[in-house]
Amino acid sequence: MQRVAARDEAAVGELYDRFGSLVFRMAYQTMPTRAEAEDAVQEVFVRLWRTADRYDPKRAALVTWVMLLSRRHLVDKLRRQRARIKATTMDEATGAYSPPVRASEADNLLNAERFGELMKRIEELPELQRTVVTRAYLGGQTLRQIGEELDTPLGTIKSALSRALVRLRERVQVNEESAA
């Protein structure tokens, strides 16, 4: 990120290579169309480039920072779309045409907010557990690949994933019980 902040184009390319598919997957699940998801990914990486100097590795892992920034951008984008939809429905009352509102946009916003909460909980996990969860579920890597990259036995990786999932489930249950 220091190289990105220094406007090193190769570093921006590396950042995109590392996180582009992850950000796209999140945008594709959130946005109503593929084209809007692609636009959102491009906007996220422009935002990453502009705010690279704000990244503090002591406060969050890079993947967490990228995903939280992505989530904020997607939520903002969906909120702006909803505001436009409300304005166009007011135009409809005056006789102007407005496109139909899709119910899935509210669901997309809710999913993006849930994802952000999940990312916060993942960030609270011990380092190995956090790394395994993010690489397996967000990065699409196999447990064997993670073990090889971290030079850690496969059994240790499996145990870390299992413990992480138990912790995440416990935290979700505690939050659901406190909300009820």
Image (spheres, rainbow, N blue to C red):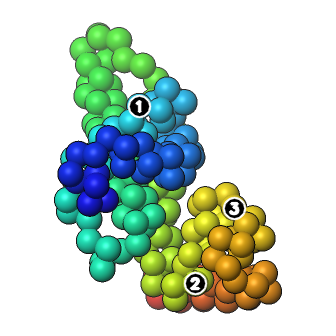
Position of 180 relative to 133 (above/below): below
Which is nearer the N-term, disc 1 or disc 3? 1
Q: What residue is drawn where x is 67% and y is 66%?
A: 136
| Secondary-structure class at tag 3 | loop
Numbered label attached to residue 156: none
Say left or right for 133 vs 40: right
Camera-nearest residue between 124 and 102: 124
Which comes before the other along the chain, label 1 or label 2? 1
- Residues 40 and 11: in front is 11
Residue corresponding to mark 1: 39
> Residue at the location (28% across, 46% down)?
8
| Residue identified by numbered label 2 | 128
Mark 2: few, some, or many residues within 10 Å (few <14, many ≥20)? some
Which percent across, then down, holds residue 7? 23, 45
Looking at the rendered structure, the kind of residue marked 2 is Leu
Is 69 on the left-hand or right-hand side of 125? left
**Where residue 147 sits in the image (x, y, percent)?**
71, 76
Q: Give the label, 1 or 2, closer to the camera.
A: 2
Residue at left offset 58%, top offset 84%: 128
Report x, y in % for residue 150: 63, 77
Front residue of this view, candidates 27 and 8: 8
Expressed as whole percent of the image width and height from the top left, the position of residue 120 reads 43, 74
Calculate the distance from the C-alpha at mark 1 to the C-alpha at mark 2.
Answer: 33 Å
Residue at image mark 3: 141
Label 1 sits on a secondary structure element that is helix
